[in-house]
Image: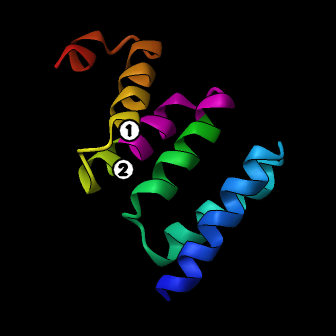
Amino acid sequence: MKFDIEKRLQKGISTSEEGSLHKAEEYYRTILNLDPKHPEANHNLGEIVASANKMQEAIGLFKTALMANPKIEKFWFSYIDALIKEKHLDHARQ
């Protein structure tokens, strides 16, 4: 199963880089059905939904990524940026 998840993650990343965000979203959602706390899939899906202006969903995904691996700086940047865009400034400061 781990190999399958990593393979799908790489496909999601490559399709996202090619501009196929809808297809990348499908890969990430499939991963999260198998492993709901997968940090990269949560973060990358969060970026996609944030680009579609679905900030509340993005915040939840970024928070899950952070809880799974709080040492990754890009997770923090994405989470804080989404909080600021939603005007949750107190949470962003924390």
In the image, residue 76 above or below residue 2: above
- Residue type, label 2: Ala
Q: Is residue 7 left or right of residue 46?
A: right
- Residue at screen point 63% across, 26% down: 53
Main SS of residues in magenta: helix
Circle 2 — which element? helix
Q: Where is residue 26 drawn, in percent x and y?
A: 71, 62
Residue 48 part of the magenta segment: no
Viewed as shown, does residue 47 lie left or right of 65?
A: right
Q: Residue at x 74, y 55 (%)?
A: 14
Closest to the observer: 73 or 50? 73
Q: Please provide percent x and percent y for residue 45.
A: 57, 48
Give the label on residue 60, or none: none
Query: Looking at the image, is 75 positioned above or below residue 25?
Result: above
Q: Residue at x 45, y 24 (%)?
A: 82
**Considering only vertical position in the picture, is 89 above or below 2?**
above
Amino acid type at image mark 1: Phe
Neighbour tally class for label 1: few under 14, some 14-19, many 20 plus, Cα within 10 Å: many
| Residue 11 in picture, x, y percent from top left | 71, 65
The extreme left residue here reads 94
- Left or right: where 52 falls relative to 77: right
Query: Which quadrant of the rendered structure holds the C terminus?
Result: top left
Tell me, yes or no, whether the two marked residues, 2 and 1, touch with CB atoms within 8 Å. yes
Numbered label attached to residue 75: 1
User: What is the CA distance from the residue labelled 2 to the residue labelled 1?
Assistant: 7 Å
Picture quadrant of residue 66: top left
Q: Earlier in the sequence, mark 2 or mark 1?
A: 2
Q: Tell me which residue sits at (28%, 56%) in the image.
A: 68
Query: Which residue is the site of mark 2?
Result: 65
- Identify which residue, 37 or 87, lies in the foreground: 37
Magenta segment = 50-62
